[in-house]
Amino acid sequence: MKPMDHLEHLDRHLVDELAQVARETVRDELREQTRKQRRKAALYAASGALALYAGAALALAVGLALALGLPDWAAALITAAVLAVSAFVLRSMARPSRPGAGHTADGVPGHEGAGQAAAAAGGLPYPPVPPAPPAAGATDAVPPPPAQAPDAPRREG
């Protein structure tokens, strides 16, 4: 028996013990973090529920105020229309703008630089529009075709 055989057993035992301590430490740290996140999520959920009830109370107050001068059904209809328009506006503000969905003001007189503003905002502007159509007899508008296609192999000989 070698003199170091009993130390090899101790090394394995020490490595296993260190691994166990590391696992427990990481597990405890993750538990603590998830406990904090659970609490924060519960507070956000409660806040959202209370905001929903506050919005409903505000809508009820607007409807009752309108009902003082209008029939009840008209006040409810106006309140519903105001809420629907508000929801549509908020949804439109939340959606990212899509290039090509609307028209830019590049071709409209008095809106020079709108293409640069759209490009700066992340949209893709339309190509610039010439101020006037080309003349009927202009031959320089279209370049003449090349004698040979640029990607075709050339034969010399």
Image (spheres, rainbow, N blue to C red):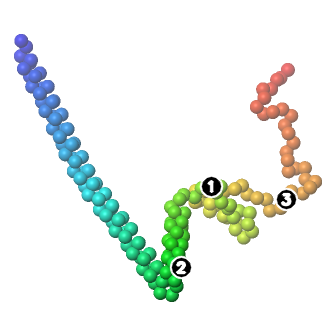
- For marks 3 and 2 on the same chain, the one whose residue lies earlier in the sequence: 2
- For marks 3 and 1 on the same chain, the one whose residue lies earlier in the sequence: 1
Q: Which residue is mark 1?
A: 99
Label 1 amino acid? Pro
Q: Nearer the viewer, residue 79 or 40?
A: 79
- Give the Cα distance between marks 3 and 2: 55 Å
Say which quarter of the image contains residue 109: bottom right
Q: Nearer the viewer, residue 106 or 51?
A: 51
Task: State the image coordinates of residue 141 (x, y, percent, origin top left).
Answer: 85, 51
Label 3 amino acid? Pro
As displayed, is residue 41 above or below residue 142? below
SS for callout 3: loop
As displayed, is residue 22 above or below residue 155? below
For marks 1 and 2, give the one nearer the viewer. 2
Left or right of 83, for residue 140? right
Contact check, label 3 and label 2, Cβ < 8 Å: no
Q: Which residue is mark 3?
A: 133
Who's the residue at 15% across and 38% down the image? 21
SS for callout 2: helix
Say which quarter of the image contains residue 116: bottom right
Q: Which residue is mark 2?
A: 74
- For marks 1 and 2 on the same chain, the one whose residue lies earlier in the sequence: 2
Q: Quadrant of the N terminus?
A: top left
Q: Specify few, some or many for label 3: CA neighbours under 10 Å numbering under 14, 14-19, or 20 or more.
A: few
SS for callout 1: loop
Task: State the image coordinates of residue 125 (x, y, percent, origin top left).
Answer: 66, 57
